[in-house]
Image: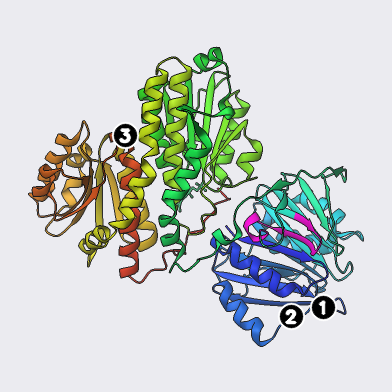
Amino acid sequence: MCGVMGYTGPKEAEQLLLDGLFALEYRGYDSAGIAVLDESAHIKMVKRLGKVQMLSDSLKKKPLHGTCGIAHTRWATHGVPSERNAHPFLDCSKRIVVAHNGIIENYADLKTELRAQGHVFTSDTDSEVVTHLVESMYDGSLVSTLRKVCMRLEGAWALVAMCSMEPGTIAVARKGSPLVVAPTPEGAFAASDLTALAPHTSDVIPLTDGQFATLSQDGTVTITTIDGTVVEPEPIHIDWDVSSATLGGYPDFMKKEISEQPQALSRLLASRVASGTVELDELSMDGAALLNINRIYIVACGTSYHAGLYAKKLIERWARIPVEVDVASEMLYDEVLADEHTLCLAITQSGETAETLLCSRKLRRMGAKVIAITNVLGSTVATEADGVIYLQSGPEVSVASTKAYTAMLVASALVALFLAHGRGLMGSGEIAQRLAELERVPAAVAEILDRQGLAKEAASVFEGATSSLFLGRGLNSASAREGALKLKEISYLHAEAYPSGEMKHGPIAVIDKGYPVVFVVPQDDVHAKTLSNMAEVLARGADVVAVASDGDAEVLPYAQHIMWLPPTAEWLTPITSAVYLQLMARYVALSRGCNVDRPRNLAKSVTTE
Ligand code: M6R
């Protein structure tokens, strides 16, 4: 939610900041703003409602000149999306300016206190209190003041601040919201996410909670703790191709990211599979420790939670360890039964999802070993976990997760196989065979991309619909959920998912003539049962779409549209079927005139509870 950016150095700041905002726009896109310190150390600021492009268009007409500046792209929490509520915020004297990502939970009390001191607020946001607090507590050093201010704040923040009194200096602070900094020969940068810095450097420093940094015009960065102690920076090297965050000829990022799946999955497999074995040093525990795991908690939200549902079934099937999986926002407040024999798998594309982080911290405090499955290098989950399995999907810009989801499924399968082998439940021969099956998946996905016309045809059943049902059984009940979520989030069409067998216990009541129902029905051990469910909805006049195995004649009488799955092992059909469901959701969304990359009300990274 929200992206912040800061730059100080020898170059004009405006374009660098705008480019950064474009890269961060996936985090929020209801308004944007930029503030630059001009030659006479006056703060000049422009804010616009709408996407970063609106801001950029305004700046073309009236550019801001200066070599030190901060910027922000917003996803509204407190206060409607408007120019008035767009960041950054100036203090009363117009000498201090601050942009914020996160939530200031005690803002109401602080606002009352600051108003009593005579401060005048110009927005309805929680964030503006920070600017006025800095104004009220300024001690001659922006970073030192920011430390004192942060002691008064409750909530989460990535703050970037600058002031007229210290031209060329930017002070930043982090707690609970991501923030990376980078000293470079062309100046010093700060941003919510390393993708914004990728064009400028390959080495970035993710700040950890409670850290502050001073960015200086000579390109240096000094990192400190709350008591001012200087911290030795721990840079990480980015080896992502910068061009992977650009459209590269595709009409939208979702299409690009769906299309990248064969390469992304191959990359992940190549890094984890060698000579018929799974290499997961992150889980490196000797046999005794592996045998001692008596429970696994999978912590995740949204699409990542659906990957967790798949992981649970495979781990229980092969490694015979009981797995609990629930959305992190629930598990966070549940009684969990974790101890030192518990393994926690935190699945999160961004590595920054608030509940996933909070819940994995809770399990860790109880003694669990935490393994993160994430896509983002240096993300908070990655820095906090005992081990990290990177998805290696490359930047996922579209809000709807696609390539990261299928990579999560592959990573989950690798974990299940690793545990099964380590616990002596699957011999080397069977492991090698399963891995060979897995290694054929990228080609199967490529074949689906060649057949995407089938998804386009299937999308036509949603014409004029106001609601829809997605059904699947066994491993593919997670696929049904993911298909429904994908459709819902990008097309705004209501979609509900159920395990197929549960349909007759209530949802069947909504089915009527022309009601769209999507079945994920590969040839697996529950195939016949799902066919019966298809007959039940067909008898009630539904328009049925099926995702079925190539050559499955039995499914033909039950569906108007069929998206045919190339042959794979049955346990891999959730990966291939996901690709069809992603494509279909995109076609439906496009036909409804929706922006598939930036659906309304959503943000790519949800860093507040
Ligand atoms: O970054 P995470 O994987 O932790 O994000 C979790 C959810 O917010 C995310 O999967 C969300 O549901 C996506 N928009 C799905 O496409």
Residue corresponding to mark 3 = 571
Q: Disc 3 or disc 1, which is closer to the eye?
A: 3
Residue 302 in the image: above or below residue 502: below
Which stretch is magenta?
A: 182-198
Picture quadrant of residue 20: bottom right
Question: How many neighbours does mark 2 have within 10 angstroms: few (below 14), some (14-19), or many (20 or more)?
Answer: many
Residue at screen point 35% across, 54% down: 582
User: Are the residues at dot 2 and dot 1 in contact (C-beta closer than 8 Å)?
Assistant: yes
Which residue occupies the foreground of this view, 481 or 476?
476
Q: Secondary structure at mark 3?
A: helix
Q: Position of residue 337 (x, y in %)?
A: 50, 22
Which of the numbered marks, if any, corresponds to residue 64?
A: 2
Indicate the quadrant where residue 390 lies: top right
Q: Residue 134: which disc?
A: none
Residue beneath disc 1: 38
Q: Secondary structure at mark 2?
A: loop
Q: CA distance from mark 3 to mark 1?
A: 60 Å
